[in-house]
Image (spheres, grey):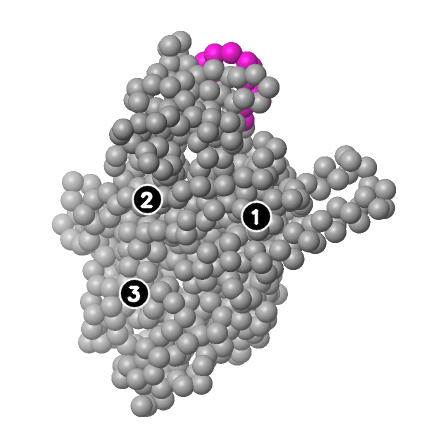
Amino acid sequence: MINRRALLTGSTATLAAMSLCNIRDARSKGASQGELNARLWEPSAFSGLIATGFFQEDVPVGRVASHRSRGVLIVDAKQIVPGMQPRKGEAGKGIVFPEATGSHLLFPNVKDSLALYRWSLSITRLNRKPVETPITTQIFSVNEGTGSTNRHPRQAVICGDSVVVLTTYHAAGPKGTVRANLTQEGYVADGASWNSILSYRRDGKLHMTVNGLDSGFTNSDDYWAWGRVEGGPASIIGTRALTNAEWAYDLIMFGQGELSDAQVRKLEGWAHWRVEQPDRLPSDHPYRHERPLIEKQDFAQLYQHDANAWNNWGTTLSKAQSGAMMGKPRVDPIGFDRVFFDDFARNSVAESAGLSNPLSNWFAPGSNTAVGQSARLLPLARSAELYVHKPDAREDGVVSGGSLTLSLLYRDQWYASCITTLNDAGQGRYWKNGGIFRLRCRFPRETNPAGGFFPAFWAYGREALLWRHRERIEIDFWEFDGKNDSYLNGGTVHVHKGQIPGLLGHLDKDAPAFEIWDGEIKGSNIGQTDNFHLWDGEWHTWEFRIDPDLTYLNVTIENDSRWIELFRCPTPVEFLQPIYLMIDYALRTRDGEPDRSRRHDFVIDYVEVLQKSDRLKQVEAPFLKLPSLEENVRVGATVKCLSGLPSPTTGVRYIWHVDGIPVKNGGGDALLLDQRHAGKMLRCLVRATSSIDQTELWSDERVIQEA
């Protein structure tokens, strides 16, 4: 593990010098103080960064019965009992919680804390007194409690022989609640000094800094999440216990998005300049002597909905034009590289709301509970019979490896199945700038399929999992139903309002949805005597291809032997955003209910993603060059990947692939090759998790030689 403070003598020291030069240069050109202030970095300058923020200046002096927050999610922290109310002090003294009184404020349960509260910042002061037994003073606890759906997050200060800050997140594990804790010294508990505590989740790990001192990160599992529960316990500022030290807060803030290293440093600097105590920061901190400034690289690359462009694209779609090449040979995919492959030789499906293996390719059932329509989605642990893995399915006609069967099943009610390449926290695999998304699957022969059958192969925008007020992009590659299993709902595209809609210029209702092509796939259009039927008992390979200019849906027919095109359309910018895959078998009982006495299956052979080779060779910041593999790529060797990132870089994830199948995710830049790998293609995906956009690039691809 690299401590970020080690960076400060290098690039960040240069950044501090540049900031100072920028200020001086602006002053030399006659910039006013107002213009200078406009360039100063602060969280409110970034749309939606503050999810919920309690600022001391927002309440009057005196007893605090209610503190209304700012941010995307506005809540009231309240206390109706006068004897338990904190007091707002004079002239920036903060909101004071007297010693041993149990003073506290309560605000409602935050069901969406997993996605919404990814980081928290507090500025507090505390008056430590000599004690025989350590005293824990809780600053806050979101969804207070002891279970996996509680403490998201919690901050506390423990005063004993020393002063230690504790930050906690809980998660769900196979055997119950998993507690991720971090501790750090450096808190000055003299009653007068303001202290910053910044805790944040990034790439599945919990981090914390105290007055700019980095505690590193914790939790051994890279992928963790928890379930969202309706009506859980309230959140609390302070504690009900009568053992707290006297303390006060200047602000308590919860934020969206996964923070980059640069954002972490700027938040620390801003916090200490806010209370006029930058000298509490380490001597080598880039913002100890100068306030942080707004720079171009502070802004993430996020989707901006353009209603005019969206409507122009959608209203110009023509079914006749989109389907003009139906039945013709597909446009051959030339110049693509495989970037993901799962043939289900192993069971790669894990719980979407809990701890899982970093090598999990799929998560079930996902965070969207509406996917099942009339059928209920259950956690994987309670619905394993809906996700049947067969490690060797070659006798069933798979190309290689195994298979995964998604099912509809009736017990006391109908239950559906769904897999997605991201877990509920937004961790996993996703792709931007288009590509080919390929699925080989089979539905058992049904001469009269139930009308309510509703399977789908589709994609969703990742951004909406990180920024809850921003639009949610949905691309339905295909949807079929049993009312007419020749009828394709093809390329239905949605831009949904955010989970917290209508804020900061974002949609307050869904944009109009558009469909690229819908209708019967007639035999006369595809060179067959009969119409295409989904429930025909045959294997078909589907591919949704997103190129920069055109997008296509293609499928194989005639025993999976011939590729044909079904439709095409111009590619809108929405298709080029970071998206993740979803595959589900849902049910709409209003259209007809299937036989309750048996299961109804959707068998998957493999899923594959390819992207343009030349696109994969483009270098993007913060990378200085493409990642590369060392020369000794042979069985028995330990191969290293050179990241191509500036050295040192704190957050880097290496995802090793053999023939496109992930074989190691996280855990370092080296991979030991064994005999199973001989003759296959080796490649490594390097993700700069500490950068503003968590940019990822691929290494070169090499054949694994025999020993």
The label on residue 283 is 1
The one nearer the camera, 132 or 260, is 132
What's the CA distance linking mark 2 and mark 1?
27 Å
State left or right for residue 314 relative to residue 607. Answer: right
Whether residue 303 is visible to the viewer of this picture, yes or no, is: no
The residue located at (54%, 43%) in the rendering is: 281
Q: Earlier in the sequence, mark 2 or mark 3?
A: 2
Give the extent of the magenta segment.
Answer: 54-66
Specify few, some or many for label 3: CA neighbours under 10 Å numbering under 14, 14-19, or 20 or more: many
The label on residue 518 is none
The one nearer the camera, 665 or 351, is 665
Q: Amino acid at mark 1?
A: Ser
C-beta proximity under 8 Å, tags 3 and 1: no
Whether residue 38 is visible to the viewer of this picture, yes or no, is: yes
Residue at which label 3 appears: 604
The residue located at (30%, 55%) in the rendering is: 220
Q: Position of residue 426 (x, y in %)?
A: 41, 51
Residue at which label 2 appears: 181
Q: Secondary structure at mark 2?
A: strand
Q: Amino acid at mark 2?
A: Asn
The residue located at (60%, 60%) in the rendering is: 11
